[in-house]
Image (cartoon, rainbow, N blue to C red):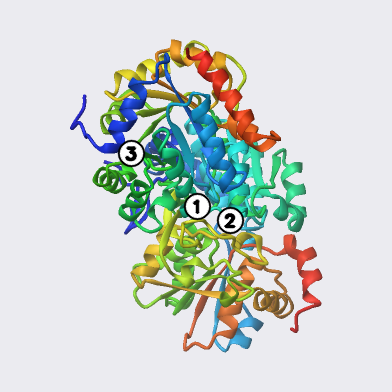
Amino acid sequence: MSTVEHRFGPYGGQYVPETLMPALGELEAAWEVARADAGYQAELQELLRDFAGRPSRLYRARRLSEHAGRPLYLKREDLNHTGSHKLNNAIGQALLAMRMGKRRIIAETGAGQHGVATATACALFGLECVVYMGLEDTKRQRPNVERMELLGATVRPVEAGTGTLKDATSEAIRDWVTNVQDTHYIIGSAVGPAPYPSIVRDLQRCIGDEARATLLEREGRLPDRVIACVGGGSNAIGIFTAFVGDPGVQLIGVEAAGEGIASGRHGAPLTVGGRAGVLHGSMSAVMQDEEGQITEAHSISAGLDYPGSGPEHAFLRDSGRARYVAVTDDDALRAFAAVTRLEGIIPALETAHAFHYALEEPSDSTLDLICLSGRGDKDLAQVLEKLGGVEL
Amino acid sequence: MTETTVHNAGAERIAAAFANSGKRAALMPYLMGGFPTTALSLEIGLAYADGGADLVELGIPFSDPLADGPVIAAAGTAALRAGTTVASVLEVCAGLAQRMPVVIMCYANQVLARGAEDFAARLRDAGASGLIVPDLPMEEAPTVLAACDAAGLALVPLVAPTTPDDRLRAIGSRARGFLYTVSVTGTTGEREAPLGDRVAAVVGRAKAATDVPVALGFGITTPEQASEAADAGADGVIVGSRLVREAAEAADPAAAVREVVAGLADGLS
């Protein structure tokens, strides 16, 4: 019997076309072997160290801590190679694909960070790479499209639906249904059918494991709060996992409130709650109408512009172990500007949501750990255009 | 190989349609409910019956149809934009069920939205005989299967070329109505090339794994391919995208699809 979870409480499962079921079984079996295999782990650890630059730094923010009135520790995934945490998962899954004899890789991407990470891993290993990206996102994240193409990947813009992450993910799954025999699908977030949410968590949990060890060493204590942004939820599950067994540590996931929860134009299914639903192969918190049609998400940040969520997050929410909140587009923009000017770090717009919560929501926390999931260079054009309209 | 043979009203009506088709294989066209409009989709379905269809698969459009290729996905998007709902598709269902058995095709989240029991009861009340859910594999199906059995609906499972033999037998033993056998590794959509020898193996494997009729679908476009499917031993032939494209492009969709269905029926005579 496999030790890879298929369900997190009622969430998760494998709601996919029959064509993919054998491939999911093969992937699960390969992951069970690989994650316990010394050779796989040695190669992965070497690449994470020498290619990606892990462990990533843990930085006690100087002026932001002063501003917040408590120490803020930033886990610097923005300093990871390719500029976000996404490479941790992409390298691990690319190595896994090669163990399964698959040399064609597909991926979906929203902000382009996962697409760039996957294209990078494929360049490193000489694998064919096709990245699906919503048409709207190819426009607002142009630099990442150019990076992927320079790295040798084919970027396929997806026009269907709203041309965002949801549509790109659907199109990637259709490609996989068609080419499953020679193709591995590297899902970029902790979503999708089992075993993906478990694989992505296992490959991202280094974020929290490293941060916890470093903080204990440096401060001799654990944080009161761990704060991370949540689209599908891979950086969040990556930093939460190490702390799930520490009951004194609050885990807070920050979703996109977009134009405000009340407007309906947001990307906050975990925060809003409501009936669970099936999207992209798993049961979790999703945005949907009463007939089960998935509704459109909205967020200024492409990486949070997603109506679904990772099933383990829905489980952590229901169990009370983690809490989910949402931050609006405008507040994220303000935090983006504040972090840039106060600390000399340009964060990804996704991460800016987490910063707003940590900086502006009242709390009696005495030490926060924030996952700085990625750098914001990709967002510059969009932010410069929008900042004029926001009072800082 | 059958664990328990389930007799219900839907499965019996489907079985009769296969038995009485008068062709080498039953002709089972797919219809996107609400496309191009609710009224026209009913007309198109009736034209299928006039053209010689034995059974109709009626799709309820879904926002994220993972198993569908571009033609059916686009028709679904258009139908949703036009305001199609479960209720409006079930009106079409009720109209068509007077002529031939209707098998509803939709996605798991639509079935689960108000609970499988409620959904199955609504389908039964609209005269449907069966339900196909392409993103509900065997492992996730038990509650929906129980709800369909209770409502007298046949829950029709899918098998694919990638499905290994032992799994095929497990799915085949749980099949109600017929076994939907996917002819290609891929999504729905027209494919022009002859089906070839591979399909005989696909159909043969499916027939060895179940007691219910085996219907072949995905990618079947021409009367020649339909004939090949019958030659390969398929008990039914499912044609989707070819007809949905006709509904999208023709000036008089009902007349156009009637002609295409009649051509397919000829291929099976």
Label pair 3/1, CB-CB below 8 angstroms: no
Q: Position of residue A85 (x, y in %)?
A: 58, 57
Q: Which residue is mark 3?
A: B155
Quadrant position of residue B102: top left
Give the structural element (helix, strand or loop) at label 1. Answer: helix
Q: Which residue is mark 1?
A: B88
What amino acid is found at the position of numbered circle 3 in the picture? Answer: Leu
Question: From mark 1 to mark 2, how far is it between C-alphas?
Answer: 9 Å
What amino acid is found at the position of numbered circle 1 in the picture? Answer: Ser
Left or right placement of residue B205 versus residue A165 in this view: left
Q: The residue marked by circle 1 belongs to what chain?
A: B
Residue situated in front as seen by the camera: A385 or B266 = B266
Left or right placement of residue B150 versus residue B79 in this view: left
Q: Quadrant of the C terminus of chain A?
A: bottom right
Question: From mark 3 to mark 2, how far is it between C-alphas?
Answer: 27 Å
Q: Which residue is mark 2?
A: B83
Q: The residue marked by circle 3 belongs to what chain?
A: B
